[in-house]
Image: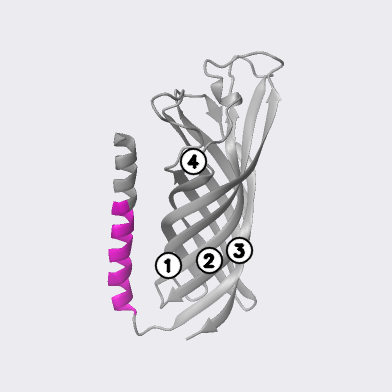
């Protein structure tokens, strides 16, 4: 219960700060033109799951691709919405048994909504994104090369089905944008932490925490469609 309250207060404080920052920034640039752009993106994810009790892990590599829409409200501040297909999960790390491996891969549709701040010159810009993200679990797969062994101290997660299909948390990152005559090219890195747990985390459950975290490197292509 205490952990849920902390998560709620964290999200509320983040959104409140983001809203106030956006409002103050928008007042400064209200006379600037609006720019709309749409495009596609693709990249690589490096994910793990924060378990309690702890499960030793290396990061699991996966894929992500999707659609992007962006509205810049002037030179410095804008909004960005994405719809992505994402692979994430975990890869267990057995230092004493390097020939044994176990991984679990989850497939999601995710919807991040960002406030964007950019800076720089006319054709090359740096930027920062931050905002809430929700997702919906689609399916899962696993790779079991344990050969009947149980090398880890914690093994309950191998047979547990996903209980919470809905995912929510905070995401943010930054990168560089290059503007050309054929469109905008963006290279960025980002981090997502889920406040929801993939498994049940009540007192009667084995895990008290089972939330995902994902690092992503991605390339985006945007085509400007309108400027007001």
Closest to the observer, 75 or 105: 105
- Residue depth check, mark 1 versus mark 3: number of the one nearer the observer: 3
Main SS of residues in magenta: helix
- The residue positioned 33% from the left and 61% from the top of the image is 18
- Do the numbered discs 4 and 1 sit on residues whose CB atoms are within 8 Å? no
- The residue positioned 66% from the left and 24% from the top of the image is 101
Which of marks 3 and 1 precedes in the sequence?
3
Label disc, if present, on residue 118 of the rendered structure:
1
- Do the numbered discs 3 and 4 sit on residues whose CB atoms are within 8 Å? no
Residue under pointer 2: 177
- The residue positioned 65% from the left and 76% from the top of the image is 182
- Residue depth check, mark 4 versus mark 1: number of the one nearer the observer: 4
Of helix, strand and loop, which one carries label 1?
strand
- The residue positioned 54% from the left and 43% from the top of the image is 165
- Choose top left, top right, bottom left or bottom right for residue 119: bottom left
Which of marks 1 and 4 precedes in the sequence?
1
Give the distance between the C-alpha atoms of the residues marked 3 and 4, in whole angstroms.
Answer: 21 Å
* Pointer 4 local density, CA inside 10 Å: few below 14, some 14–19, many at least 20: many
Residue under pointer 3: 67
- Do the numbered discs 3 and 2 sit on residues whose CB atoms are within 8 Å? no
Of helix, strand and loop, which one carries label 3?
strand
| Numbered range of the magenta stretch | 12-29
Label disc, if present, on residue 213 of the rendered structure:
4
Which of marks 1 and 2 precedes in the sequence?
1
């Amino acid at each position: 219960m205490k952990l849920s309250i902390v998560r709620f207060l964290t999200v509320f404080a983040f959104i409140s700060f983001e809203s106030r920052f956006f409002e103050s920034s928008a007042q400064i640039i209200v006379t600037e033109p609006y720019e709309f752009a749409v495009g596609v993106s693709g990249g690589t994810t490096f994910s793990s799951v924060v378990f309690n009790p702890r499960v030793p892990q290396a990061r699991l590599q996966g894929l992500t691709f999707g659609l992007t829409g962006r509205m810049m409200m002037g030179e410095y501040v804008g909004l960005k919405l994405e719809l992505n297909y994402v692979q994430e999960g975990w890869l267990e790390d057995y230092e004493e048994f390097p020939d044994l491996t176990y991984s679990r891969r989850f497939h999601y549709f995710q919807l991040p909504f960002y406030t964007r701040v950019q800076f720089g010159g006319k054709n090359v810009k740096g930027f920062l994104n931050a905002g809430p993200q929700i997702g919906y679990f689609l399916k899962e797969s696993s790779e079991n090369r344990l050969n009947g062994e149980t090398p880890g101290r914690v093994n309950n997660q191998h047979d547990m089905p996903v209980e919470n299909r809905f995912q929510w948390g905070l995401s943010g990152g930054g990168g560089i944008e290059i503007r050309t005559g054929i469109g905008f090219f963006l290279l960025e890195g980002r981090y997502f932490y889920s406040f929801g747990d993939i498994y049940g985390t009540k007192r009667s459950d084995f895990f008290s925490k089972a939330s995902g975290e994902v690092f992503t490197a991605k390339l985006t292509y945007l085509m400007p469609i309108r400027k007001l």
